[in-house]
Image (cartoon, helix red, strand yellow):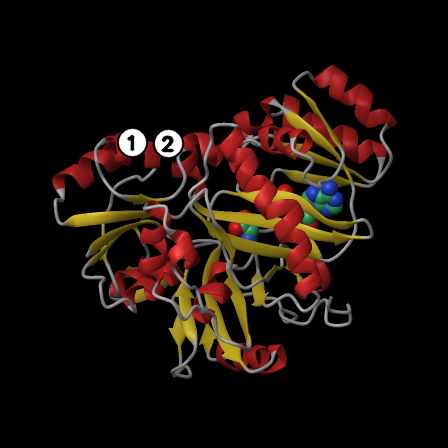
């Protein structure tokens, strides 16, 4: 079967690598892909946020039998709806279901209505009212732009002045554009965080192995928020008791809530969770695979990914058994100097002889004059597996040291946090 994969980052590279292992997968097209993806798939230069253009392309390519939509923006714009309405088979939620990520206000109201544990909050669409509330709210206070903002629309403010400035940036200066039409003002929660991605067809929900992201730019969780500087799997503190609690109080209720709202979710539902003193709570939902979580989750998957995708599309997820490898996986992201603020592109990337079992995922790369060059903020992800997190971590960093480009920076502490938190 020939497959089109929408997206161009490390996540899509990991999805395509996993699909390639399926004996049923024929040719893969990637829209738009990157240099690494180009070694596995035919790159298609169409803007995937232009849903009509994507629809026309798929109509014209009769050999494409299945489309996987990985990023949040085309899902929020209704690309799944567009392709389905033209009779094509798709992996990814429709626009109504993707609202669970594309509107934080919608997600918060859903959780309140169905009693799903999350931080207390208020929603405002008027600046003056938000300001009045923020001035009396306990500190620190969390401000979230309602819409999609490349993972950067969340501000944690420790002083009243910071909160006032943050509110101004979101609602008046429109730093995140229309995402700031509404703001969610939220209680600050504390505890270790875990990402749990789950396959769901609206009837069954199956969690994948857990993972932990590192959003800040520098070691020790210092610096600005980024798209993610590295991940490891599994989360050391997440044992059977946690998993049971999350299934009963969060995953099954969320699936049922979406069905009850007429927004059946089919695809990957991402639960960003925090283990607080009052139990597991939802920090955020995403309507898709996480990036760079996917780069440590999919290398552990034993089951054929196309079989899982199709089971979701055809609503028979209950019939297949999804199996994972034992052990751990660590992914270290190599970023351009200056990321996430200002960085240059076009730096030549040198790659030595990597261990054959290491996964090098391309994010912002391109080929220029026959050379591999940087083409984005996050450039590469180096994923390695091991029997333990420490083994995986050592292997990942050994291979990171074989790669270089001008200005390259990476965190040196991926894979060590949360080790002393008891597993339960
Ligand atoms: P989000 O984009 O919603 O995942 O938020 C980005 C990061 O902000 C999360 O991974 C958390 O570390 C932090 N965060 C979001 N909401 C809260 C909250 N209510 N309390 C504490 N930290 C939060
Ligand atoms: N790693 C967080 C995300 O994909 O949104």
Residue at screen point 37% across, 32% down: 78
Q: Is residue 151 visible?
A: no
Labelled pair 1, 2 in contact (Cβ < 8 Å): yes
Q: Which residue is mark 2?
A: 78
- Tell whether 82 sits left or right of 27: right
Residue at screen point 51% across, 60% down: 208
- Tell whether 232 sits left or right of 8: right
Q: Disc 2 on helix, strand or loop?
A: loop
Q: Is residue 205 visible?
A: yes
- Tell whether 348 sits left or right of 225: left
- Tell whether 101 sits left or right of 81: right
How crowded is the residue under tag 2: few (<14 C-alpha within 10 Å), some, or many (20+)?
many
Q: Which residue is mark 1?
A: 82
Image quarter for ligand 1: top right
Q: Where is residue 229, by image quadrant?
A: bottom right
Does mark 1 have its CB less than 8 Å from ligand 2?
no
The relative height of residue 145 versus residue 133 in the rendered view (above or below) is below
């Amino acid at each position: 079967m020939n497959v089109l994969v929408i997206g161009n980052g490390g996540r899509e590279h990991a999805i395509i690598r996993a699909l390639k292992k399926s004996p049923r997968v024929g040719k893969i097209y990637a829209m738009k892909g990157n240099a690494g993806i180009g070694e596995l798939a035919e790159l298609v230069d169409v803007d995937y946020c232009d849903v009509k253009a994507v629809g026309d392309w798929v109509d014209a390519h009769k050999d494409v039998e299945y489309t996987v939509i990985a990023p949040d923006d085309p899902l929020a714009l209704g690309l799944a709806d567009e392709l389905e309405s033209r009779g094509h088979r798709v992996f990814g939620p429709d626009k109504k279901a993707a609202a669970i990520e594309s509107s934080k206000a919608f997600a918060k109201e859903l959780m309140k209505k169905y009693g799903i544990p999350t931080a207390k909050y208020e929603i405002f669409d008027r600046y003056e009212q938000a300001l009045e509330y923020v001035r009396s709210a306990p500190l620190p206070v969390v401000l979230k732009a309602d819409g999609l903002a490349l993972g950067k629309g969340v501000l944690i403010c420790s002083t009243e002045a910071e909160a006032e400035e943050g509110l101004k940036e979101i609602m008046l200066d429109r730093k995140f554009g229309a995402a700031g039409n509404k703001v969610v003002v939220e209680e600050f929660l504390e505890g270790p965080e875990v990402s749990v991605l789950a396959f769901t067809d609206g009837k069954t929900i199956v969690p994948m192995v857990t993972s932990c992201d590192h959003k800040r730019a520098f070691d020790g969780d210092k610096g600005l928020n980024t798209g993610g500087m590295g991940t490891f799997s599994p989360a050391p503190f997440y044992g059977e008791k946690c998993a049971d609690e999350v299934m009963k109080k969060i995953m099954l209720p969320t699936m049922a809530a979406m069905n009850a709202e007429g927004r059946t979710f089919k695809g990957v539902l991402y639960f960003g969770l925090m283990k607080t003193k009052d139990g597991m709570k939802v920090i955020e939902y995403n309507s898709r695979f996480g990036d760079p979580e996917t780069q440590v989750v999919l290398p552990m998957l034993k089951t054929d990914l196309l079989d899982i995708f199709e089971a979701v599309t055809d609503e028979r997820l209950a019939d297949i058994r999804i199996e994972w490898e034992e052990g751990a996986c660590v992914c270290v992201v190599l970023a351009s100097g200056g990321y996430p603020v200002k960085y240059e592109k076009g730096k030549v990337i040198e790659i030595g002889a990597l261990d054959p079992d290491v996964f090098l995922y391309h994010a912002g790369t391109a080929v220029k004059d026959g050379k591999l060059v940087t083409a984005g903020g996050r450039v590469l992800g180096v994923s390695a597996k091991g029997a333990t997190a420490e083994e995986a971590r050592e292997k990942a960093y050994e291979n990171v040291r074989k790669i270089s480009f001008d200005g390259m920076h990476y965190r040196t502490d991926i894979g060590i946090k949360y080790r002393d938190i008891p597993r339960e």
